[in-house]
Structures are given as C-alpha cells and as structure tokens.
Image (spheres, rainbow, N blue to C red):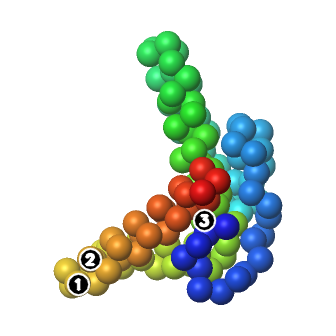
Amino acid sequence: MVAQREGREEPLIPMPELTWPALRKAVATVAPSRLPELFEDMQKAFVEAGENGSIVPIRRFHLHWGEIVEIERHPETARRLHAAERAMASDDPEVRQRAIREIGDIVRAAGRAVAGE
C-alpha cells in the first residue's frame, strides 16, 4: 500500500479498519511500545470532541493512528522512518534536510494509503 517502498515486502498485518478496537489491536501488534501514546491521544481526542461538540477530533485521531499503523506494518518503511527521525539530531543541515524529505515522503504516502488513494 505504501507506494514509495522500493521492495514489495509483505506487511506484517493487514491494514485494519479505522476504529478504536481495530487500531488498538494493530498497534499492540506492530508497535506495542506506542500503546500508552495511543491511549493518551484517544483520551485527548474524546475530550476535545466533547468540548467542541464535534467528531472531527475523533476522526483525526483515527486517521493519524491509521497512518502510524500503515507505516509500522511495513518493517522496511518503519526502519526508514525511524532512521530519518534519528537523523534529525544531526549537526549537519544537509542530513537534517534529507531526513525531513524522507519523513515527509513516508508520512504522505501513508496518508494516501489510509485515504485509499
């Protein structure tokens, strides 16, 4: 599903539905260390939805975590993203610039995949 991947690696899991139970199960499988972040983001989304009387924060939460799952379910894509994130700490501005482009490419491709494009 992620178009920028060079190889055609098989995803670790199928892309889940963009629902709380499906995303929670997917994150537990592909990025279990991020479960506390998932729960915190979910709580923030529901509080914001209640305060604003809108489901937009909940929809945004589902899309954001769908993108994370889309990336993490492809090990090579996840490896590239995490390497680029680490490169952001470089003192070399060119290294940081390449990292920014790589992160943007990966996240945009994940967004397109989640949107079904």
Q: Nearer the viewer, residue 100 or 33?
A: 100
**Disc 3 to disc 1, C-alpha distance:** 24 Å
Q: Is residue 80 above or below residue 38?
A: below
Q: Contact (CB < 8 A) between labels 1 and 2?
A: yes
Q: Amino acid at mark 1?
A: Glu
Q: Nearer the viewer, residue 109 or 78?
A: 109
Residue 94 disc label: 1
Residue 83 disc label: none
Mark sitting earlier along the chain (3/1): 3
**Disc 2 to disc 3, C-alpha distance:** 21 Å
Q: What x and y, as percent, mark residue 35?
A: 64, 49
Q: Is residue 68 visible?
A: no
| Residue named by callout 2 | 97
Q: Is residue 85 above or below residue 9?
A: above
Q: Amino acid at mark 2?
A: Gln
Q: Amino acid at mark 3?
A: Ile
Residue at 59%, 79% in the rendered image: 5
Which secondary structure, mark 2? helix
- Dot 2 crowding, Cα within 10 Å, few <14, some 14–19, many 20+: some
| Residue named by callout 3 | 71
Q: Quadrant of residue 117?
A: bottom right
Q: Quadrant of residue 92?
A: bottom left
Which secondary structure, mark 3? helix
